Amino acid sequence: MILSATNAATTTTDSATKANAASDPSAAQDRFLKLLVAQLNNQDPMNPLDNAQMTSQIAQINTVTGIQQLNQTMQSMASQFNSLQVMQGTALIGRNVMIEGSSLAVADKAGKGGFELPSAATNVKVEVTTAGGQVLDTIDLGAKAAGRHTFEWDASKYTGATDALQFRVTAVNGATKLPSTPLALSKVTAAGAEDGQLKLTLANGKTISYSQIKALV
């Protein structure tokens, strides 16, 4: 904004209203118009304002006002989106989900887990282990196609703590060992939003993003 020496009082008013103008587009526009009128009233008749400068200033304030209004609209949309995400997340509470991990979920004397194969396997085995790596049992699943699979282990004879049991998957195609991704099963107990992302709290104590879910079980 171009101000002459005779506009000192107007400059003081400008400083006092900057805070409101920054957060309120209409206030910024109103302040600009008042300053412009003050300039016109106090301009030097021998050196009037340049029409090009005045037009440029009007264009600039309109641009700034438009950006501020756009920012306010985007903030409102982001808030509504977060609320919608939380509402969608609450529908998952009580549901079982599968995420990457090798923890074995045990309930009603049955251990459950899953895995993903990038290609078909002629034989797949799952070893159930303690937290220390001791093998408790081996499940022979036979041939499996590429994709996601689940398995179940009879835990009725196991008398130890079940909250720390693990599993590992071995898949082969003939003599070639295949990579596999273990999938842990857990129940969703709570949902919320954090940094614009839907967060889910699981029964095993972990907090995950919605994008980490591989499957609903």
Image: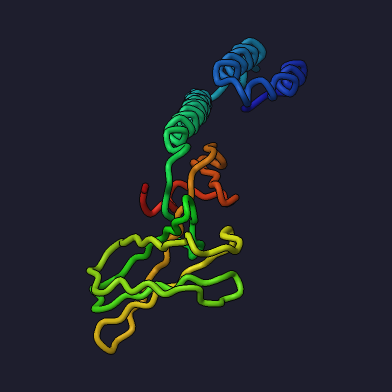
Which residue is more in the foreground, 42 or 106?
A: 106
| 3 horizontally vs 49: left or right | right
168 lies above or below 162: below
Q: Is residue 63 at all visible to an observer of this figure?
A: no
Which residue is more in the foreground, 111 or 172?
A: 111
Write the residue at 67% across / 24% down.
3
Residue 11: x and y in percent read 73, 21
Residue 121: x and y in percent read 25, 76
62 lies above or below 176: above
Residue 114: x and y in percent read 38, 61
Write the residue at 49% across / 29% down.
83
Quadrant of the drawing holding the N terminus: top right
Which residue is more in the foreground, 93 or 109?
A: 109
Which residue lies most toward the bottom here? 175
Residue 119: x and y in percent read 25, 73
Write the residue at 59% across / 20% down.
24
